[in-house]
Amino acid sequence: MDVTQLREELAKYNQEHLLQFWDDLSNEEKHELYTELKELNLDEVTRYFRKTQHSNTEELGKLDDRLSRSHLKSMGMVRTDADRLKQYENEGLRLIGNGKVAVLLLAGGQGTGLELRILKECTMLDFHLGKLFISYRPKILRLETLAEQTTGQRGSVPWYAFT
């Protein structure tokens, strides 16, 4: 087993953490882990990951382009009549326009994935941190725009992210 070579190979793909507890393993466990890691085609896995990321980004863009008032009607109460849904929509947009709506983003553990070094609960959102947060931004900006078009007021929607 050439662990040094394996570490170097893993480092090329930022996966060296997979050997973080190597010294704590028994010989049998080391052999098993070594074999599993050597069988991984990290180049192929990385290509699939990037392709998926790219595809998801494109799909989010397409979805954001289609977000309109008519899509707001389809969310939520299926059995509510059209007049009531219109009331809810107008009230929601009025509240957004008046700055009375906030977003609570529950990002289950993503702070670690975004490599935040400070207490996650105290993080101010920086939209350059990662695609998780960026993917929600256009949707919220679109709702702010819809609120302005409907009410004449453009409220700002604050974000609270729990990682």
Image (tube, rainbow, N blue to C red):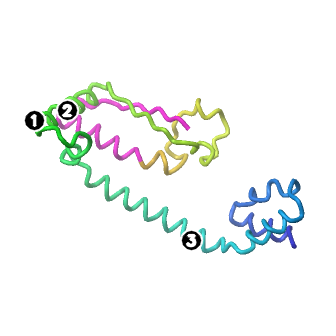
To which residue does mark 3 refer? 47
Element at label 3: helix
Task: Inspect the image, locate mark 1, and give the three-letter code of the amino acid beneath it.
Answer: Asp
To which residue does mark 2 refer? 88
Q: Residue 153 at x, y = what percent?
A: 23, 29
Looking at the image, which residue is at 88% across and 59% down?
Answer: 26
To which residue does mark 1 refer? 83
Going from N to C along the chain, the mark reached first, 1 or 2, is: 1
Measure the C-alpha gap from mark 1 to mark 2: 9 Å
Marks 3 and 1 close (CB-CB < 8 Å): no
Residue 14 as seen in the image, left or right of residue 95: right
Q: Which quarter of the rendered picture does the N terminus lie within? A: bottom right
Crowding near the residue tagged with mark 3, few <14, some 14–19, many ≥20 C-alpha atoms within 10 Å: few
Measure the C-alpha gap from mark 3 to mark 1: 49 Å
Does residue 116 sit above or below 91 in this rendering? below
Residue 113 belongs to the span the image colors magenta: no
Q: Residue 6 at x, y = what percent?
A: 80, 69
Towards the viewer: 65 or 43:
43
Residue 36 as seen in the image, left or right of residue 3: left
Nearest to viewer (mark 3 / mark 1): 1
Looking at the image, which residue is at 10% across and 35% down?
Answer: 83
Bounds of the magenta segment:
136-163
Task: Inspect the image, locate mark 3, and give the three-letter code of the amino acid beneath it.
Answer: Arg
Element at label 1: helix
Q: Quadrant of residue 72?
A: top left
Does residue 76 sit above or below 101 in this rendering? below
Looking at the image, which residue is at 86% across and 65% down?
Answer: 28
Marks 1 and 2 close (CB-CB < 8 Å): no
Q: Which quarter of the rendered picture does the C terminus lie within? A: top right
Element at label 2: helix
